[in-house]
Amino acid sequence: MRKTVSPKVVLCDLDGVVWLAHQPIPGSVKAIESLREAGIRVVFVTNNSFSTYDEQVAALGSIGIAAEGDIVTSAMSAATAMKSHWRVLVCGGRGLIEEISRVTDKVVVAYNEPMAQGPFDAVVVGFHREFNYQVLADALTAVRGGAVLIGSNDDPTYPTPNGPIPGGGSILAAIEKASGVVPVVTGKPYEPMAQLVRDVCGDVSPDDMVMVGDRSDTDGGFARILGARFAMVLSGVMASADGVDVDIVAADLSAVAEILLQE
């Protein structure tokens, strides 16, 4: 039976939990403040690979949440799959470009250099609005030429105040379908992201962690890989927890925090 005492760490998704397109969900900022005041560390674990680390810190800071040292992104997880000598075709946003560039200086951004000549060692994919037919064609050519296909995440949609929009997983699926190659995915709920979280949290046991998210497949699956409890909120992608393996279900982060602080 899972322990029901207050956790030492709350792993908190961002999109659909803290905010929608950087617009705070009511009560979320106060909930994080309350958890921290109770001595619980809050670590933000996001599949957003588009924004840079500093942009994430600044965006959270703008709504009153300090986050330096407490953010793990799927772009960071994708970088762990890189090697320093690799030439990489990046089909993704600023955050993914930045993290891959920390590992190798042989980075080609697909939409900035269309029809770039190979060979490439890897094609790395994340959410970006510049995706078009030429990017798809160039990614296909690189993968068929021997490049490893890596996805920062495989989330099919991304929550916004006006409803979901296609996510990085939809872009990855197009490249997978065209190339016939199954990608390596590094973000939630996969092991590379889990290892990053373990590194950030140090010697905290998974029994002392709770993963708060709005997707049963991504966030719930991530909780299972870690061995942590899963608290699902209904403020993002999913409107119901019916049929979901979940430890806590609540309307939003504020309600989850209230439950955890009563344990």
Image (spheres, rainbow, N blue to C red):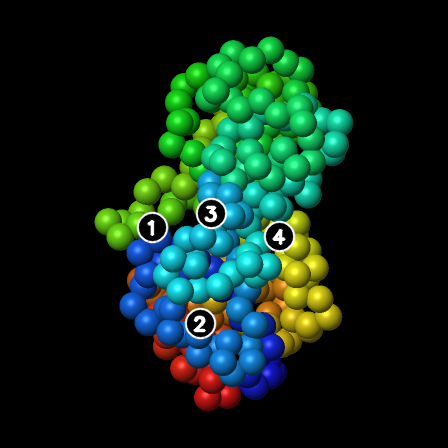
Residue 73 makes an appearance in the image? yes
| Rendered location of residue 168, percent (x, y) | 45, 39
CA separation, marks 4 and 3? Answer: 20 Å
Q: Is residue 59 above or below residue 263?
A: above
Residue hosting label 2:
32
Q: Amino acid at mark 2?
A: Ile
The residue pinned by badge 4 equals 193
- Tell me whether the residue at label 4 lies in contact with that at label 1, contact meaning CB atoms closer than 8 angstroms: no
Q: Which residue is mark 1?
A: 21
Q: Nearer the viewer, mark 4 or mark 1?
A: 1
The span from disc 1 to disc 2 (Cα, nearest Å) is 18 Å
Q: Residue at x 40, y 65 (%)?
A: 64
Q: Please provide percent x and percent y for residue 141.
A: 57, 16
Q: Nearer the viewer, residue 131 or 249?
A: 131
Report whether 157 appears left or right of 69: left
The answer to whether the residues at label 3 and label 1 have Cβ atoms under 8 Å apart is no
Q: Residues within 10 Å of mark 1 (few under 14, many from 20)?
A: some
Three-letter amino acid code at the position of disc 1: Ala
First of labels 4, 2 by sequence position: 2
Above or below residue 140? Residue 203 is below
Tell me the element at label 1: loop
Numbered badge on residue 55: 3
The residue mark sitting in front, 4 or 2, is: 2
**How far apart are the alpha carbons under marks 3 and 1?**
13 Å
Please tell me whether mark 4 or mark 3 is closer to you in this view: 3
Question: Which mark lies nearer to you, 3 or 1?
Answer: 3
